[in-house]
Image (spheres, grey):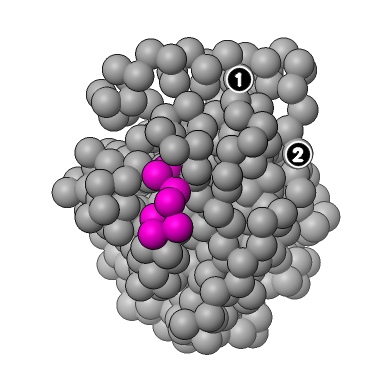
């Protein structure tokens, strides 16, 4: 296994659509459930689509993180607005052409909005949105697609990661912490940048291990728990006693190894302490740097349903609850000095006293 180490580069990283039973066609596998009907109308009569279309990022549903947060947002929207929908899994080693075909199928079938979960859908959303101007498209973690019918749903990941860094530095007994990024890309550098800055705001001389699992998404940096486990093992052996992973599905390996070695781990994107699949490790999940992907998905669906579709860049931050830090673990809540430091850091960022680095 190849790991890319860099001490100065920086990182990435609750409610969705239970879908009607539809066979997966073309590329990708559909994950389906049931709801009301194949189409729905809003109380104001402005919505006439078939429902919600969701295409997952690398790792797919079940990552207990990024994709699951999007799915949760769709479930909430489906329940509240009485919509049905379809969610589609990615394939291994797929191309942009596969993504284009997937989004095209959803749009042709009448789903509205159609949402690509992850920056990897950028080229596909740009091409397909141009062909379906009456359909609203959403893309998460990419702001390069400029079109009247596209909402670029992005986040200040660095702000949540700053809080994670503060928590890690305050909780560490060795003044030695670690960061594990899934893929060495600018989006994940934002996570690391905020984490490092937050930790050094507490202890300027703190030692920080920094590691990236792969250079490209295709190598499995976001979808390989074994890679995450190996990286965590190495950082713990090097002396780190709090780890933060921004690595999608690979982060599950970091969490499991941290629990096995009785080492604190900070989750990402979703509140991983409350994820059922991670329940046996939760005593060692100090907290999670949250990115409200589910809320962004819900807001986009709501806007389309109400006949006023969002478009352009829609950015989540600490000030609008688009990002945050989960404090579900009672052990974390008992660390009053850690909690106080994180709360102060959050307010300082909101008040403009602290500007968080992005690289």
The image shows a total of numbered marks equal to: 2
Point 58% across, 14% down: residue: 344
Which residue is at the front of the view, 336 or 152?
Answer: 336
Q: Position of residue 356 (x, y in %)?
A: 73, 33
Q: Answer whether residue 237 is magenta in the image.
A: yes
Q: Position of residue 202 (x, y in %)?
A: 60, 25
Sequence-earlier tag: 1 or 2:
1
Which residue is at the front of the view, 37 or 71?
Answer: 71
User: Dot 2 corresponds to which residue?
Assistant: 357
Q: Is residue 273 above or below residue 68?
A: above
Which residue is at the front of the view, 7 or 116?
Answer: 7
Point 63% across, 48% down: residue: 192
Residue 345's disc number: 1
Q: Is residue 99 above or below residue 200?
A: below
Label pair 1/2, CB-CB below 8 angstroms: no
How packed mark 1 is, by other alpha carbons closer than 10 Å (few <14, some 14-19, many 20 or more), is many
């Amino acid at each position: 296994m190849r790991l890319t180490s860099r001490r100065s580069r920086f990182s990435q990283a609750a409610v969705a659509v239970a879908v009607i039973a539809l066979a997966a066609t073309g590329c990708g596998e559909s994950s389906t459930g049931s709801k009301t009907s194949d189409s729905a109308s809003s109380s104001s009569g402005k919505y006439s689509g078939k429902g919600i279309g969701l295409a997952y990022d690398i790792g797919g549903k079940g990552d207990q993180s990024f994709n699951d947060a999007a799915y949760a947002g769709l479930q909430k929207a489906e329940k509240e607005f009485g919509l049905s929908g379809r969610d589609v899994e990615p394939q291994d080693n797929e191309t942009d052409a596969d993504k284009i075909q997937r989004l095209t199928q959803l749009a042709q079938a009448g789903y509205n909005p159609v949402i690509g979960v992850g920056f990897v859908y950028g080229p596909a959303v740009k091409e397909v949105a141009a062909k379906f101007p009456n359909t609203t498209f959403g893309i998460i973690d990419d702001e390069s697609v400029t079109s009247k019918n596209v909402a670029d749903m992005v986040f200040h990941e660095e702000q949540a990661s700053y809080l994670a860094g503060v928590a890690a530095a305050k909780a560490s007994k060795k003044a030695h912490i670690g960061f594990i990024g899934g893929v060495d890309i600018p989006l994940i550098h934002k996570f690391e940048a905020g984490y490092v800055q937050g930790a050094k705001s507490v202890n300027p001389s703190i030692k920080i291990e920094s590691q990236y699992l792969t250079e490209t998404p295709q190598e499995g940096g976001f979808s390989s728990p074994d890679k995450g486990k190996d990286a965590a093992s190495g950082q713990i052996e090097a002396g780190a006693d709090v780890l933060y992973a921004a690595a999608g599905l690979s982060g599950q390996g970091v969490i499991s190894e941290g629990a096995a070695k009785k080492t604190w781990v900070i989750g990402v994107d979703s509140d991983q302490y409350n994820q059922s699949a991670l329940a046996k490790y939760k005593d060692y999940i100090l907290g999670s740097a949250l990115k409200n992907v589910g809320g962004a998905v819900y807001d986009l669906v709501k806007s389309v349903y109400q006949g006023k579709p969002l478009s352009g860049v829609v950015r989540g931050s600490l000030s609008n609850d688009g990002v945050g830090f989960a404090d579900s673990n009672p052990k974390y809540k008992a660390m009053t000095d850690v909690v106080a430091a994180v709360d102060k850091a959050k307010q300082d960022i909101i008040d403009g006293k602290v500007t968080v680095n992005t690289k």
